Every structure is written in C-alpha cells, then in structure tokens.
Amino acid sequence: MSNTVDTLNTVADSVQQSSGPGSDWILHHVMDASELDFEPFFTIHIPQFPTVFGIDMTPTKHVVFMWLAALLVLLTFTIIANRYKKSLVPKGITNFFEVFILVVRDEIAKSTIGKGYEKFVPYLLTIFFFILFGNFLGLLPWSATFTSNIGATAALAICSFFMIQIAGIRQNGFFGYFKGLIPHGIPPVLLVLMIPVEILGLFTKPFALAIRLFANMIAGHFVILALIGLIFFMGTVLVAPAAILFAIFIYLLEILVALIQAYIFTILTSMFIGMAVHQEH
C-alpha cells in the first residue's frame, strides 16, 4: 500500500509541476490551447498562421475540433442525402438520423414557429447537429469540447440573433417589426421605459443562449476532472473506487446533457424566431 501511495504522490507532484496547483491542472484540460495533447504519447503543435490586419489567424485546439464537427456534419448529411436519392425508405444510419431530423422539424420548428416554419428548418437542423456533434466530440479521449468555450457559444448565439432579427424584419417590415416589440395599449408615458427594456431584451436572448450552453458543457468536465483529481490531491487510493464510480456516473450523465443542450439551444432559437415572425401572438 505504501508503494502505491508513493507512486500516486509522484504522479500528483509531476502534475502540479507541469500544470501548477490543482485548479490549474483542471483548467489545463478544459481551456483552449495552441496544441493538441495526446498525453502521454505525443503532442501536436498547431502551425503558426500569418497575421491579418493585426489579428492572429492561427487556429486553436477548439477551432480545430470546431472544423472537425462541421466536416462531420457535412459528410454525414451528404451521405444521407445521397441515400435518399436512391431510396425514400430510410435504412441504417439514415433511419437513425431521420429521427432527429423529424424531431427538429415537427417538434421544434413546426410547433414553435407555426406558419412558414419550413424556411427555418435548414438553419435549425444545422445548429442542432453542429452543437450535438461538438458536444459528443468532447466526450472522446484526447478531444476538446468547443461548446465549453464562451467564444464559440457566443458566435452561435450571434448567428441566431441575426436570424431572429432578419426573420422578424422580413415578415413584418423594418419599422413594423420594431414597432411590434412594444405591447399594444401601453400608455405613452411608459414608452420611455418600455422602449429601452424591449431593445435590451433583443440582446439578452442571445446572451442567455450563449451562457446556458457554455456553462452546462464546462460544468460537467470540471466535475469529472475534480473527482478524478481527488485521487491525487488526497494522496490515497482509498478514495479511488468512489471517485471513479462517481466520475463514470457524471460521464454517462454528460452524454444525456450533450443531447439536451443541443435540443434546448435549438428550441429556444426556434421560439425566439416564432416570437419575431408572429408578433401578434
């Protein structure tokens, strides 16, 4: 037992020497980086890209996995589309993904947007599967969850923000859309208060989308790493069985959370589009 404890202490010391205190060790495995770590085997340093207008264009680890998720979405649905051209009866992987497609189309877009929902289905499908693939990529060994990066979730929220505004303006006209933001029957004296509140509300919606996805995805990774880190921080194998069991439970829960968060981001975006398009409701 003493030899085992000494070994664990050695590992813990090496972790702290390379990554700092315990909290830094967790952050090292969660935050973005300029290399791809395949510890303990090797590390791939991302090549330096040229600077454009003073902006460093070198991709980070999260950007690489963002590109990978986009590529997987493109390849997956190219294959599915080609199979539909050959046969309208779904089989295998086509049948599997058709379930999600129908949920997004019927349970999300149709039920929350209503009339004219068809034109928004491609966008909703894109963000749903992009987030879903990104969430599940982050559960693989030596990978990274780009949806736990506030920059990535903010970019997705900004895309939804512009989609919401464009949808509302196209349906109601520029002045009609912004006029419709103010509830009917409001006394003129309250307009001074209501107009800033409604304008602020336009920006709080995408802010809520970004923070909700970011917080939920990063929280699970923090908990898993903290549970595993207990083995080294406490310097005893006695906590290993409980720590590993709880970590496995949280990991399984993360699989469910990955699906739920993609669903929530998509349905909230769809609801906001529906509110912008049908302001009379």
Image: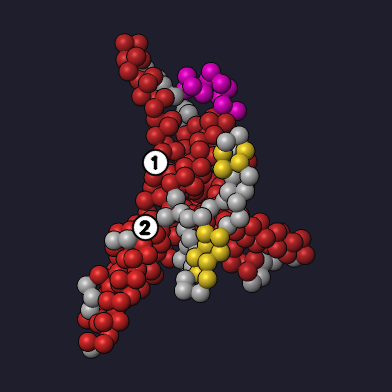
Mark 1 crowdedness (10 Å alpha carbons): few <14, some 14-19, many ≥20: some
> What residue is shown at x 36% (from left), y 15% (from top)?
191
Q: Give the quadrant of the C terminus.
A: top left
In this picture, which residue range is highlighted in magenta? 169-180
State the residue position of label 1.
208
| N-term mark: 2 or 1 | 2
Q: Residue 78 or 33: which is nearer the viewer?
A: 33
Mark 2 crowdedness (10 Å alpha carbons): few <14, some 14-19, many ≥20: some
Tag on residue 6?
none
State the residue position of label 2.
27
**Quick check: 77 above or below 265?**
below
Q: Quadrant of residue 95?
A: bottom right
Q: Name the spot of residue 119 as percent of width and height, x first.
A: 63, 41
Q: Name the spot of residue 235 as percent of width and height, x first.
A: 23, 75
Q: Residue 35 or 194: which is nearer the viewer?
A: 35
Q: Is residue 169 visible?
A: yes
Which is the main secondary structure of the residues drawn in magenta?
A: helix
- Residue farthest to the right, as pictured: 86
Q: Is residue 123 visible?
A: no
> What residue is shown at x 43% (from left), y 46% (from top)?
150
Q: Give the quadrant of the N terminus.
A: bottom left
Q: Quadrant of residue 216?
A: bottom left
Q: Name the spot of residue 79 as percent of width and height, x first.
A: 70, 63
- Residue 240 sits inside the magenta stretch: no
Q: Name the spot of residue 217 as percent of width and height, x first.
A: 40, 56
Q: Which element type, helix, strand or loop, lies under badge 2?
A: helix
- Residue 179 sits inside the magenta stretch: yes
